[in-house]
Image: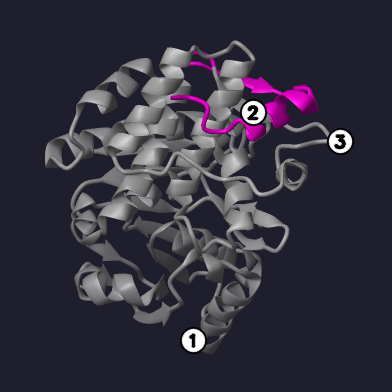
Amino acid sequence: MIVPIALASTQGITYDIHIGTLPELIFDTSVVLVTNPTIAGYHLQTVLAHIKAKNINIVTIPDGEEYKTLETVENILNECFSHKLDRKSILIAFGGGVIGDMTGFAASLYQRGIDFIQIPTTLLSQVDASVGGKTGVNNKYGKNLIGAFYQPNAVYIDPEFLKTLPSREFSAGIAEMIKMAVMFDKEYFNFLEKTDLKEEFTLKKSIKRSVELKASVVNQDEKEAGIRAVLNYGHTFAHVIENETQYKKYLHGEAVSIGIVMANALAVELGLLSHKDALRVKLILEKVSLPTEYEIQNIDNFYEHFLLDKKSSRGNITFILPVGIGKHSVQTNIEEHRVKKVLANFGGIK
C-alpha cells in the first residue's frame, strides 16, 4: 500500500508513505540511523538487514519524551559531524515519534538541510507523527515550541514492528486514530468503535485510513495555516498536561486522550457536541484502556499555559472542537469564564 504526499503549496515536494513489509533500502551514500536502546534491542538487526549503504553508523539516544531537547539534537548533530556526513548523506529515524521529531529536526539543521527518512516503530508514529514533516523539541515553556517543518524523503510503515510494542504504547497510538475519525470521518469512527485493532488485517486497514486522512490534510496545508490546525484536536489541553507532569506521567497519546475529553466537554458547553456523542468518544477511549481523567491543581495556571500554544495569536486561544462526530470547528473567541467553567468541572461527562 502506498499513500502519496504531494504538497499543494510547495512545488516539487512529493514522497510516498509505504505501508507493508519493509523493503530493501539501497543508498549510494553514508547513512546515520538514529534509534533508542529499547527499539535497538528488539529490531536493530532486522532493520540493518534491509539497508545497504556506503557506510552506516548507529546513533543511540535515551528513550523518553523528557529527552526530547535541544541537547539531544546537538548530540545527534555531533555524531553526524564525527562520521563526516556531507550534504548527500541521509539520516534515518528508526523509532517512535520522539525519535522521528528529533531526527527530522537534526536533518533540517545539519549543513542547512540533508535528506532523512522515517521508519516508525510505534502505532502513534505510524498513524500520525511520521507523516507531514513536523519536527522539533520541547522546552520548559511547552511542547514542540522549537522546530521546523521539514519533510522526509519517504516513510516506511511496517506493522510487524508493532508486535513488540507494549500494550500501553499501542493504546496511545489508538488515541491519534480516534482523533482523526472524530474530526474527519464518522464512518471510520463507527468502524473503530466496533473493531478489534489487534487483528492484523483490521490494524493494517486502520493504519492506512489514518494515514490517508493525515496525508490529505498535509497536502492541503503543510505549515498549519488552515485546516492542518484541526489535527491538534485534544492537543491544546494535552500539551498543558504533559508540561505540568514534566513529560513523565503520561505517554503523548494518553495525554491526547484526556485532552480529547476536555475538548469535548468544551464543545458540549458551547452546544457543538451532544452529551451522547461526547460519551461515545469517552467510552471508546476507555475501551482501549486510555486515561480520561485529570485533576487540575490550578485552573488559572492551566489556562495561562494555553497562551503558549502555537495556534494562539495575539492573546486569542484557538480551540479545535468537534461538531458532532466527523466534523470540526476552529474556535478563537471563547470567553475565558466558559473555558474555566469546563476546567473546573472536568470529568462531568458521565
Residue topped by disc 3: 314
Residue topped by disc 2: 342
Q: CA distance from mark 3 to mark 2?
A: 23 Å
Query: Which residue is at a point 39% across and 39% down the rendered structure image?
Result: 175
Query: Which residue is at a point 52% across and 50% down the rendered structure image?
Result: 151
Q: Secondary structure at mark 2?
A: helix
Residue 229 lies in magenta, yes or no? no
Corner quadrant of residue 75: bottom right
**Mark 3 / mark 1, whichever is N-terminal:** 1
Residue topped by disc 1: 83
Badge nearest the viewer, 2 or 1? 2
Judge the density around disc 2: few (<14), some (14-19), many (≥20) Cα neighbours within 10 Å. Answer: many
Callout 3, which amino acid?
Answer: Arg
Badge nearest the viewer, 3 or 1? 3
Q: Quadrant of the C terminus?
A: top left
Q: Which residues are magenta?
A: 323-350
In the image, residue 290 above or below residue 266:
below
Q: Horizontally, is 107 left or right of 169 in the view?
A: right
Callout 1, which amino acid?
Answer: His
